[in-house]
Amino acid sequence: MTGIRDIIFVTGNLNKLKEVQMILAKNESDDDINLINKELDLEEIQELDLKEIALAKCKQAVSMLGPGHAVFVEDTALTFDELNGLPGAFIKWFVKSLGLNKIVKLLDPFENKGATAITTIAYADENGEYHVFQGFTKGRIVESRGPTNFGWDSIFEPFESNGKTYAEMEKLEKNSISHRGRAFDEFKQFLFK
Ligand SMILES: O=c1nc[nH]c2c1ncn2[C@H]1C[C@H](O)[C@@H](COP(=O)(O)OP(=O)(O)OP(=O)(O)O)O1
Ligand SMILES: [Mg+2]
């Protein structure tokens, strides 16, 4: 199949948008995606189930945009092994109110600093059918290293990065092992199958 299709990505996060643009730009298929960003203020429901959160976000986007569009959202979570999945989707509010250093300190009582970064994509196709994709990257929480302009990038050191935090990695390198890169690998496989 060939042709360019319009797909709307609803996000207000420019760092995310940049990564997603880069990830989608390098697809091997003849098919191409015309990514359209809409910045809509979507509510995020209080839930532990990451798929439910992403789906609720996507449904809200569809109801705001009207039917007939291909539209997706993504929601990114960070779970700590010792905190049984928390902060999870609430990481955004932890970053906002605690700041990175206090988040690191939350794990002081524990030897295990293990954490998992998870991106969940919810996609509504032109027919109004919903599809969900996820990507996971395991690593550990460390003292902040590298630029602090994107969320918790500077305190997450993936196991596959030779000791670098996400913030210390080149974008291409981060995307090749990241929660977001992996979620979009799944999504692309679906789109181009
Ligand atoms: O790769 C990442 N590396 C480091 N930090 C990250 C990453 N990806 C998201 N983040 C941060 C942004 C926000 O503090 C929280 C996720 O919340 P999340 O709702 O998914 O993002 P958001 O509200 O900023 O954008 P959106 O408008 O798409 O909902 O983790
Ligand atoms: Mg959000």
Image (cartoon, rainbow, N blue to C red):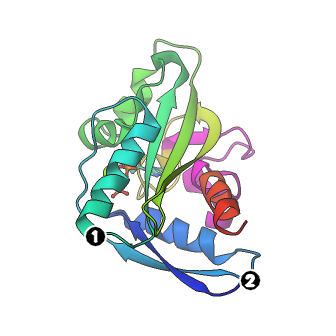
Quadrant for the C terminus in the image:
bottom right
Q: Is residue 178 magenta?
A: yes
Looking at the picture, how far across and down is residue 2, in whole percent? 70, 85
Numbered disc 2: secondary structure: loop
Question: What amino acid is found at the position of numbered circle 2 in the picture?
Answer: Asp
**Residue placed most toward the observer, 159 or 54:** 54
Q: Which residue is mark 1?
A: 66
Looking at the picture, how far across and down is residue 128, in whole percent? 42, 61
Tell me: residue 185, above or below residue 89: below
Residue 28 visible somewhere in the drawing: yes
Looking at the picture, how far across and down is residue 125, in whole percent? 48, 65
Looking at the picture, how far across and down is residue 166, in whole percent? 58, 51
Numbered disc 1: secondary structure: loop
Q: Which residue is mark 2?
A: 30
| Camera-nearest label, 1 or 2 | 1
* Boundaries of the magenta span: 155-181
Question: What amino acid is found at the position of numbered circle 1 in the picture?
Answer: Gly
- Dot 1, how many residues are within 10 Å of its Cα: few (below 14), some (14-19), or many (20+)? few
**Residue placed most toward the observer, 34 or 106:** 34
- Residue occupying the point 24% across, 65% down: 64
What is the total number of numbered labels drawn onto the structure image?
A: 2
Q: Is residue 6 magenta?
A: no
Residue 23 sits in which quadrant? bottom right
- Residue occupying the point 39% across, 37% down: 89
